[in-house]
Image (tube, rainbow, N blue to C red):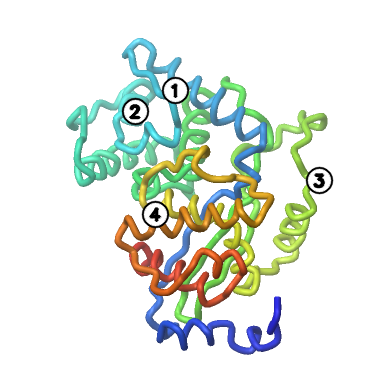
């Protein structure tokens, strides 16, 4: 990228001038999202669509509950409440159908409190707000822990890992890092299972993660330039699913990237998040100031 030396000296300079944004105004916060390439891993798909979904539906068959999506159908606490009753014999005095967000959160708080007592996890990787926001990573961690605790005879796919983008806002600015997160342990029997590790970008990210090298803002603008992570981030934070048919999950042309970013900016406008003077082309061309303005609008609403 042109002007790399100047950007390294003060990566927030342009953003501050254009938007008068003081880094001190950023709310501290951290969020995670699964890398788009990891979502296409057949082992993750098997864990999510076959094993976990099948386990839920088989467990609740007698109650005529059918779950179609682990992302979409667990956020209100109903399914988790029934699973708690089925496996732990705990029947909480809660309304069956929680229709408002506040009622759903109260129900989730009660259900997860009881589940956490029985799962006995020292470091839980889920919380009420994440489950309610339909966070896929947190939901998968919770379901894997439940299967392992309540029905250990269920065979989970071995050694399922995902690449996770971690975004963190502090008073000094925005940082992103790519980490490997383990969903299921390696049983040592998957020598023949080969995931797509021939992607040079994925290998580079893994090498940087192993070396403990955080991706700074100079990489952040590139990560968001095709619009994919930005769309997934918007959907995750705002609690809705963006159909894959509406955007290009693996954009391979300028037009595809421009379409994705344009859709993201349109969604932000519909949500009432004003991103002044930012054009889709700014993000696609890896303009730091434009990318930071978009992220700032999201973190101003959801950070902290």
Horizontal and vertical percent position of residue 64: 33, 13
Callout 2 secondary element: helix
Q: Nearer the viewer, residue 61 or 299?
A: 299
Task: Look at 49% across and 30% down and name the residue there.
Answer: 149
Contact (CB < 8 A) between labels 3 and 4? Answer: no
Horizontal and vertical percent position of residue 292: 49, 73
Numbered label attached to residue 198: 3
* Quarter of the rendering containing residue 57: top left
Horizontal and vertical percent position of residue 42: 67, 32
Task: Look at 40% across and 64% down and name the residue there.
Answer: 298
234 in relation to 153, above or below: below
Sequence-earlier tag: 3 or 4: 3
- Left or right of 185 in this view: 109: left
Sequence-earlier tag: 3 or 2: 2
**Crowd around label 4: few <14 · some 14–19 · many ≥20 (10 Å):** some
Numbered label attached to residue 79: 2
Horizontal and vertical percent position of residue 95: 17, 31
Callout 3 secondary element: loop
Sequence-earlier tag: 1 or 3: 1
Find the distance from the CA under tag 1 to the CA under tag 4.
33 Å
- Mark closer to the observer (1, 3): 3
Task: Look at 46% across and 56% down and name the residue there.
Answer: 264
Residue designated by label 4:
267
Q: Nearer the viewer, residue 96 or 39?
A: 39
**Crowd around label 3: few <14 · some 14–19 · many ≥20 (10 Å):** few
Residue designated by label 1:
56
Contact (CB < 8 A) between labels 2 and 1? Answer: yes
Find the distance from the CA under tag 1 to the CA under tag 3.
34 Å
Callout 4 secondary element: helix
* Quadrant, the C terminus: bottom left
């Amino acid at each position: 990228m042109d002007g790399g030396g100047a950007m390294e000296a003060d990566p927030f300079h342009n953003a501050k001038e254009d938007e008068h944004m003081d880094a001190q105004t950023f709310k501290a916060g951290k969020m995670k999202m699964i890398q788009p390439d990891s979502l296409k891993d057949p082992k993750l798909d098997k864990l999510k669509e076959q094993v976990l979904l099948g386990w839920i539906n088989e467990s609740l068959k007698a109650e005529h509950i059918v779950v179609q999506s682990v992302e979409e159908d667990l956020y209100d606490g109903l399914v988790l409440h029934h699973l708690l009753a089925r496996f732990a014999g705990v029947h909480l005095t809660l309304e069956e159908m929680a229709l408002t967000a506040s009622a759903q959160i109260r129900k989730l708080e009660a259900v997860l409190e009881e589940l956490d007592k029985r799962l006995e996890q020292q470091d839980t990787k889920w919380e009420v707000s994440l489950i309610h926001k339909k966070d896929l990573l947190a939901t998968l961690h919770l379901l894997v822990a439940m299967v392992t605790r309540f029905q250990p005879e269920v065979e989970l796919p071995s050694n399922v890992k995902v690449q996770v983008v971690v975004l963190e806002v502090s008073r000094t600015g925005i940082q992103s890092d790519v980490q490997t997160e383990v969903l299921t342990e390696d049983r040592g029997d998957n020598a023949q299972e080969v995931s797509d590790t021939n992607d040079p970008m994925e290998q580079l990210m893994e090498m940087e993660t192993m070396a403990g090298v955080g991706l700074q803002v100079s990489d952040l603008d590139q990560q968001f330039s095709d619009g994919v992570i930005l769309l997934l981030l918007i959907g995750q934070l705002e609690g809705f699913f963006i159909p894959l048919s509406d955007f290009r999950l693996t954009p391979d042309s300028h037009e595809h990237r421009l379409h994705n970013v344009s859709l993201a900016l349109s969604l932000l406008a519909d949500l009432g998040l004003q991103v002044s003077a930012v054009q889709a082309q700014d993000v696609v061309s890896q303009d730091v100031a434009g990318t930071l303005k978009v992220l700032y609008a999201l973190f101003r609403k959801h950070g902290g």
